[in-house]
Image: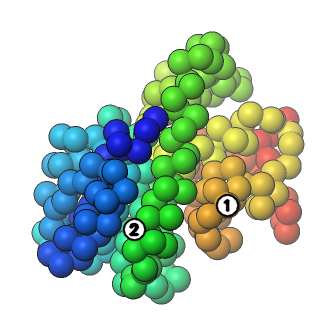
Amino acid sequence: MSEEKLKILLVDDEVDILEFISYNLEKEGFTVFTANNGREGLKLAERHQPHLILLDLMMPEMDGITACEEIRKIPALQQTLVAFLTARGEDYSQIAGFEAGADDYITKPIRPKVLVSRVKALLKRLAPATTETEIPQADNTLTFGNLLIDKERYLVKIGNEEMILPRKEFELLSLLVSKPGKVFTREEIYFSVWGENVVVGDRTIDVHIRKLREKIGNEYIKTLKGIGYKFRD
């Protein structure tokens, strides 16, 4: 996947911010779309299906948290990466961002070269998708009892009930199910699900585990205090 074909959607209510970031990203060869509120951003996301969405937190009509939650409900955008780009650096704001389904949280002000570097690091996560067609279909499905995970469609099925999970919840569940009984340390989970360039706290992973248990039941994921988590063997 070449950078010339990568699409980025910027959503921010400050026009000068949109122009400044657009200029620097377009200079790197990205195709950039812009919106100045969450509701407009959601419409453009559905229309253009960007590879990455950069969202401000505080915006009129629809704030960034709500926009991110709505994005994560759209099946066509399940592969889309979402990162908050905001001046709000408080821990609770970052936790809320990751709970909403964000892949990264970037605080302003940030130098253009650093932002471009963060964007490129995020988009590298899409690289495996370019070789996905070379993988046999069977490898795209994980089963454990009456639980089925379709990695191609980001779909989870428990018995006859189907559900679409937010990207991070899905990736976390897929990781745990890939090796039932294996204890995944927090460090392993961070690297596999969030990547080495994203800084998240212990609270973030705990929230995602809690949400998974609410959806698939408490009996599947076990906690090993001070170590990590495992899928039941």
Disc 2 secondary structure class: strand
Q: Is residue 210 left or right of residue 70?
A: right
Residue 13, by quadrant, is bottom left
| Amino acid type at mark 1 | Glu
Residue 140, by quadrant, is top right
Instruction: State yes or no: discs 2 and 1 in contact (Cβ < 8 Å).
Output: no
Disc 1 secondary structure class: loop
C-alpha distance separating marks 2 and 1: 17 Å
Above or below 114: residue 4 = above
Q: Which labelled disc corresponds to residue 196?
A: 1
Q: In this view, does 18 lie to the left or right of 115?
A: left
Identify the residue under disc 2.
84
Reading the chain from its start, which is encountered first: label 2 or label 1?
2
Above or below 101: residue 182 = above
Residue 205 pos. (x, y %): 64, 62
Residue 91 pos. (x, y %): 52, 83
Q: Which residue is drawn at 18% across and 49% down?
A: 44
Q: Is residue 181 left or right of residue 160?
A: right
**One can see residue 196 in this view:** yes
